[in-house]
Image: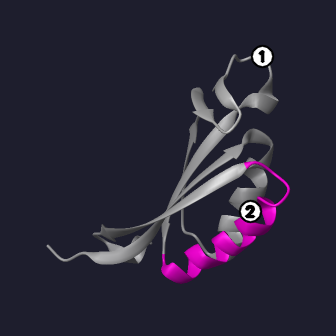
Amino acid sequence: MATHVRKKLDIVIESHLLGRVEAMLEKAGATGWTVFQGHEGKGKHGIWREDGLVDAMQTYLIIAICTPEIAQEVLNGLRVLFERHSGVAYVHDVNVMRSERF
């Protein structure tokens, strides 16, 4: 089974940043991503839970697999975005089949 190395981006953001981050992924050339809604967790400011009443408290996890060049462009944009907004990004090397999709 042949595999190819790509980068996996895990991006955790507040709901009001979703459109901006998706536009960033699109502009960089990412061919796709998946968005998961967060329901609860713990971070720098303690435990939080999504209560369904206030959209501003929602968080999202965006997962994208892409080339190293695309990942770097997205990370450069996130670095600027995270200077003013909450968020975190993780980068992993992953091996994928069907590399033409990424």
Give the structural element (helix, strand or loop) at label 2.
helix
Quadrant in which the C terminus is drawn: bottom left
Between 41 and 11, the residue placed more toward the observer is 41
Three-letter code, disc 1: Leu
- Marks 1/2: CA–CA distance: 27 Å
Q: What residue type is labelled 2?
A: Ala
Q: Position of residue 73 (x, y in %)?
A: 65, 77
Q: Quadrant of residue 82?
A: bottom right
What is the secondary structure assignment of the residue under circle 1? loop
Q: Which residue is drawn at 65% across and 66% down?
A: 25
The vertical placement of 86 against 47, above or below, is: below
The magenta segment is 67-86
Q: Which residue is drawn at 64% across and 53% down?
A: 88
Report whether 102 appears left or right of 83: left
The answer to whether residue 46 is above or below residue 11 is above
* Residue 20, percent from left and from top: 78, 57
Compare residues 9 and 42 and report the one nearer the observer. 42
Disc number at residue 71? none
Vertical comparison of 9 with 43: above or below? below
- Residue 53 is labelled as 1
Main SS class of the magenta portion in the image? helix
Judged from this view, the residue extending furthest toward the right is 84
Whole-percent x and y of residue 68? Answer: 50, 80
Report which quarter residue 83 is drawn in.
Answer: bottom right
- Whichever of labels 1 and 2 marks the residue nearer the N terminus, that label is 2
As drawn, the label of residue 23 is 2
